[in-house]
Amino acid sequence: MKYFMCGHIMTTHGIKGDLKVKSYSDFDRFYKGARLYILHGKDYVEVEVLKASEFGNYYLVRFKDLEDINLVEKYHSDDIYISELDRKDSLDKGEFYYSDLIGKRVVNENMEDRGIVEEIREMPHAKYLAIRYNEKIHLVPFIEEFIGDIDDKIVVKEIEGLFWKLKS
């Protein structure tokens, strides 16, 4: 079975087993009854969300049968995944899973190489592609004004200075 990362456990919160979770998904993955998997060591531990609520830029999540701080402390800094079986099959036009973008080659409109997407960063006003090019990370807003076609590679509408390297 294939798994896709959808969150990261930051820390525990309180004594009833709540975990502070950073979501890496545009979709609501943290709701009562959701089946998720915590990657603990090399094993995927299946869990069911008992309770979840937004907490600033994070979620407070409690899992069924893990309702005690002593049962969840070991999951501190673990990642949370969804299985391919629980993932939404069809996306609307312009929607992408982070896992479909990370590792994808980036080119400009002249098909010149501009690196590879290393991660997606969520900022207050937009999401950004973090692209490694010329041994640096370049942040490109993931919005229509900067992003062209997306298929086997991502075409970036390059503006002056977007991928330039400072001369020393």
Image (cartoon, rainbow, N blue to C red):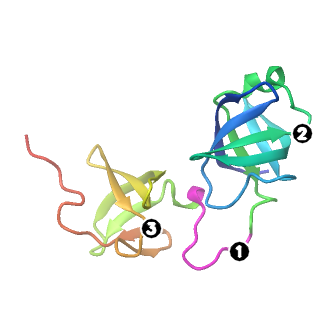
Which residue is the site of mark 2? 64
Image position of 147 with respect to 68: above or below? below
Please state the horizontal and vertical placement of residue 168, each as a whole percent of the image: 7, 40
Q: Nearer the viewer, residue 71 or 138?
A: 71
Q: What amino acid is found at the position of numbered circle 3 in the picture?
A: Lys
**Residue found 34% across the figure and 66% down from its top:** 107
Question: Is 92 one of the magenta-colored residues?
Answer: yes
Instruction: Looking at the image, tell me whether mark 2 or mark 3 is earlier in sequence order.
Output: 2
Mark 3 falls on what kind of element? strand
Of tags 2 and 3, the one toward the viewer is: 2
Residue at mark 3: 153
Q: CA distance from mark 2 to mark 3?
A: 41 Å
| 3D distance between C-alphas at marks 1 and 2 | 29 Å
Which badge, 1 or 2, comes first in the chain's sequence?
2
Task: Name the residue carrying label 1.
Answer: 90
Which amino acid lies under the numbered mark 2 shown in the image of this protein? Lys
Q: Position of residue 163 (x, y in %)?
A: 24, 57
- Label 1 element class: loop
Give the magenta range: 89-99
